[in-house]
Image: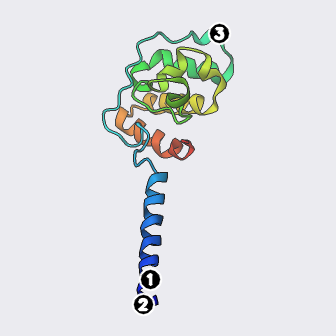
Amino acid sequence: MRTFEFRNLGILFALFAVLFLASCQSGEAPKGALSKGFKGGETRPTLQPWNFNGQTALAYQAALEIPEVLDSLYCYCDCEKHSGHKSLLSCYVDEHGAACDICIYEALMAHELHKKGEGIDVIRKAIDERFAHLSH
């Protein structure tokens, strides 16, 4: 009789552990995580790069030059969750991009790859591989 109770207790514990672990994961990757065709849909104009200095100005310049690329990238600072942003481009319609290293480095990396002639799929994959681990 005791063997039966311990076996049931073990099965119950294993089931509980599986359910607990499953509830800890949303099962969804961030929108940008190797997704095909992600498009944020940002329509607001970006701020002008001359309002900023250094790499920040270069990132705002990238947003001005390649908005369609940045609008196709997920921002791994997760500003979609805390600021309602639609894509990486959204970071550059306000001053959020000036205060976030992740936003700046994503934009600069995307701009460099675009200047090398890479398409959006290659750029997105590179950004996802480089920054996805930073997503909360």
Q: Which residue is mark 1?
A: 5
Residue 44: assigned label: none
Q: Nearer the viewer, residue 9 or 22?
A: 9
Tell me which amino acid carries mark 3: Asn
Q: Is label 3 or label 2 in front?
A: 2
Element at label 1:
helix
Please rate how many residues cluster around mark 1, counting C-alpha atoms within 10 Å: few if below 14, some from 14 to 19, many from 20.
few
Give neighbour class at mark 3: few <14, some 14-19, many 20+ (Cα, 10 Å).
few
| Mark 2: amino acid | Met
> Quarter of the image containing the N terminus?
bottom left
Q: Which residue is mark 2?
A: 1
Residue drawn at the location 47% of the way across and 39% of the way down: 127
Please, is residue 117 above or below residue 52 in the view? Answer: below
| Quadrant (top left, top right, bottom left, bottom right) of the C terminus | top right
The residue pinned by badge 3 equals 51
Residue found 66% across the figure and 24% down from its top: 99
Residue at x-position 43% and y-position 31%: 73
Please indicate, yes or no, whether residue 43 appears anywhere in the rendered image: yes
Q: Quadrant of residue 49?
A: top right
> Gap between marks 1 and 3, in whole Å?
71 Å
Few, some or many residues within 10 Å of mark 2 (<14, 14–19, 20+):
few
Residue found at the far front of this picture: 1
Q: Position of residue 80 (x, y in %)?
A: 49, 29
Q: Position of residue 116 (x, y in %)?
A: 44, 32
Q: Residue furthest left?
A: 37
Above or below — where is 63 with respect to 102? above
Q: Are marks 2 and 1 in contact (CB under 8 Å)?
A: yes
Percent of width and height locating residue 115: 45, 28
Report the amino acid beneath label 1: Glu
Q: Earlier in the sequence, mark 1 or mark 3?
A: 1
Number of marks in the image? 3
